[in-house]
Amino acid sequence: MLEPFEGNPVTEVGIEIPGAAGGLRDAMKIDPEQFRQGDQVYVVLHCDVTKIRFEPVDKEDPTGPQRRVHVFGVEGATMVDGDLVRTQLDEQADRILKAKEAERGISRLPYDDEGEFGLAHARGEHHDGLAEGCPVCDLERVAVAAEAEEPTPIKGRKRGVS
C-alpha cells in the first residue's frame, strides 16, 4: 500500500529517467556499436532516486488521488545479452498479464505444470515441436504413441471382403 501524500491517497506510481541515453554515451565511445531498425537490445541502468514528486491522477482534481513519480538519475549503463535478463523479463511479463486479466475478471485454473516448461508450453513457446522435459509435451508424446498402436478402422468396408 502506498502512503498518502498531504492527506490524499496515492494510487499510482511512475518513473522518469532523464538522461538515460547519457548513461550510455561513454560506453558507446569505447565500444561503438551499430544497430539496425528492428534490432532488440537489452540495457541495464544503474540509477539513484534523485527526486520524488506528487501529481494528481486527474489534472482536474488536484486534491484527489495522487501519482508518486520517482525521478532517477543515471549513474551508469551498459548493454547486456538478452539471455542474462530473459527470465526476469518473462516473469515480469507474466505478472503483468495476470494483473491485467484479474482487472478484467479473468482467472486461471491452477494446474500442476507450473514449472518453467509448463509455463513455456502454455505461452506457446514450443509450438514447433515437442520440447524435451516439458510435462505437457510428454503427455502429448504418450498420446501420439497410443494412437499409433491402435488399429485404424476402415469405415464403410463390406463384410467378408478382403
Image (cartoon, rainbow, N blue to C red):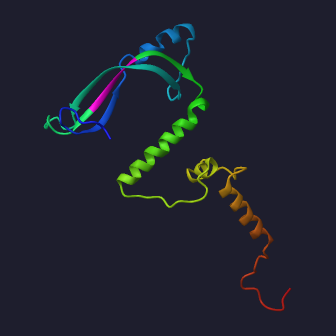
Residue drawn at point x = 67 percent, y = 56 percent? 135
Quadrant location, the N terminus:
top left
Q: Is residue 125 left or right of residue 69?
A: right
Q: Is residue 154 left or right of residue 48?
A: right
From this view, report whether residue 152 is shown above or below residue 80: below
The residue range painted magenta reads: 68-73
Instruction: Tell me which corner region of the image, top left, top right, bottom left or bottom right, holds residue 70.
Output: top left
From this view, report whether residue 105 is shown above or below residue 162: above
Quadrant location, the C terminus:
bottom right
From this view, report whether residue 29 is shown above or below residue 87: above
Q: Main secondary structure of the magenta part?
A: strand
- x and y, in percent, of residue 52 in the image: 29, 24
- x and y, in percent, of residue 132 in the image: 73, 50
Instruction: Tell me which corner region of the image, top left, top right, bottom left or bottom right, holds residue 6.
Output: top left
- x and y, in percent, of residue 25 in the image: 47, 11
Residue drawn at point x = 41 percent, y = 58 percent? 106
- Between 137 and 15, the one nearer to me in the picture: 15
Q: Is residue 94 left or right of residue 57?
A: right
Residue drawn at point x = 46 percent, y = 45 percent? 95
Determine the residue located farthest toward the right in the rendered image: 162
Number of marks in picture:
0
Determine the residue located farthest toward the bottom in the rendered image: 160
Residue 138: in magenta span = no
Residue drawn at point x = 55 percent, y = 17 percent? 34
From this view, report whether residue 83 is shown above or below residue 120: above
- Between 158 and 111, the one nearer to me in the picture: 111
- Between 131 and 101, the one nearer to me in the picture: 101
